[in-house]
Amino acid sequence: MNAIYIALNVIKINLRDRKVLLMMMLLPIVLILILGSALKNASNFSVEDAGKTEVCYLNKDSGEASKSFDNFLKNNEIKKLLKIKSVSSYADGKKLVDDGTVSAMLYIDHSYTHNFTNDKKSKIQIYENEKSTLRNEIVKSIVDSYNDAANTIMTTSKITRSRTNYVESSNISENYISVDGKSPRAIDYYSVTMLVMILMYGANYGASEIQNLFYDRIGKRIKGTGITTFQHLIGVVFGAIFTLLLQALVLVLFTKYAYGSNWGSNPLIVVGVMGAMSIFTTSMGILFMSFTGDDKKASALISIVTPIFTFVSGGYFKVGLSDSPIVKYVPNQLAQSALFNSIYGGSIAEAQKSILIIIIMSIVILIGASVFARRKLV
């Protein structure tokens, strides 16, 4: 209970600090408006870090006609775009799509070859999650590419009166195709990147609380109370985390309703990213404070690291570094990738993976902070 009381008190104190609060809230709001308005006609805000499109595949046909599509999916170029999971039944595949585990299911029924050999329409069915707008277009384009080639070969086969094991054109049965919201506008893009940036600056909360606890007079007063240092530490850490989370929620709601920013339809992932980043940045502030022993020096480090991380992850403008093995694990890049995946119909599994990596990084940082703190305080 003591830790909870301390956490609530920390939140209250932080929210009363108007100077810091204005910086944390007003800065991203102004930057989003300026950058979003100035670059609203730019065309380079496509989501490039959404990863492979995950689909499941079920071929109930045992004939030769469907085997050509099997081989098509095994093509190396297709493998760069699609991550294919085999399923044993239509119901299993449908469940994976409905749950958001995969973006779509490709399905060939048992009559595929029979219909083909009898000059009837053979269908490759696509069952898609209606929320995966961007992924729908990717899947549809890939199957259309197959059909274009099939149509050419089919025409040739009719002229030469020879058979081919490709399928006819116009043979797609589609569920849910939508192109709305498949690519972010400038205002949408900067709402995400500026949110992540300001959460990084929130590391100052963690540094400030550790300064108060271990290096200022407040820490000495705590030792004279019945509250242990550990209880106080837990309280101030959670207080800093929830302060950041509350500010992030306000920023998301403001940009959604004031600017019309697109935050998608998966609020759990959005909140998960904000929570993971709040934990990470608080941990980073604690690490810097433990390392320097001075909140001003820690703040200076935060002021250096945050713009660098924001820049390399494309927070200010696209820099083409998202494919770099190092940049992929920059916390800003992980958070932005998770949010873009969630908002624009990307892989939910990839978004969850990014959140998990951020949390693991936070744990490692806290361990490092404890090592530095012990050396400073011994």
Image (cartoon, rainbow, N blue to C red):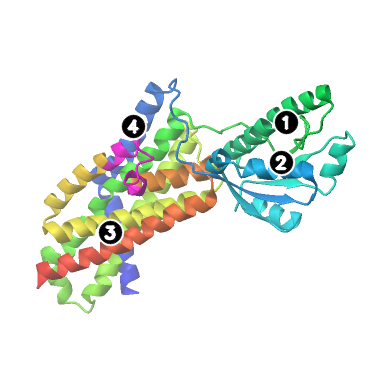
Residue 131 image point, x, y percent:
62, 42
Span of residues in magenta: 309-331
Task: Pick out the residue farthest to the top.
Answer: 41
Q: Are marks 1 and 3 in contact (CB under 8 Å)?
A: no
Mark identifier at residue 319: 4
C-alpha distance separating marks 1 and 2: 10 Å
Examine the image and state in which quarter residue 369 appears: bottom left
State the residue position of label 1: 150
Q: Do the residues labelled 1 and 2 touch (CB within 8 Å)?
A: yes
Q: Are marks 1 and 4 in contact (CB under 8 Å)?
A: no
Q: What element carries label 4?
A: loop
Q: Pick whichever of labels 1 and 3 is earlier in the sequence.
A: 1
Q: Is mark 2 on a helix, strand or loop?
A: helix
The image shows residue 99, relative to residue 69, as above or below, that is below
Quadrant (top left/top right/bottom left/bottom right) for the C terminus: bottom left
C-alpha distance separating marks 2 and 3: 53 Å
C-alpha distance separating marks 2 and 4: 40 Å
Badge 3 amino acid: Ser
Nearer-the-camera pick, 78 or 102: 78
Q: Is residue 91 visible?
A: yes
Residue 314 image point, x, y percent:
35, 35
State the residue position of label 3: 283
Q: Pick whichever of labels 1 and 2 is earlier in the sequence.
A: 2
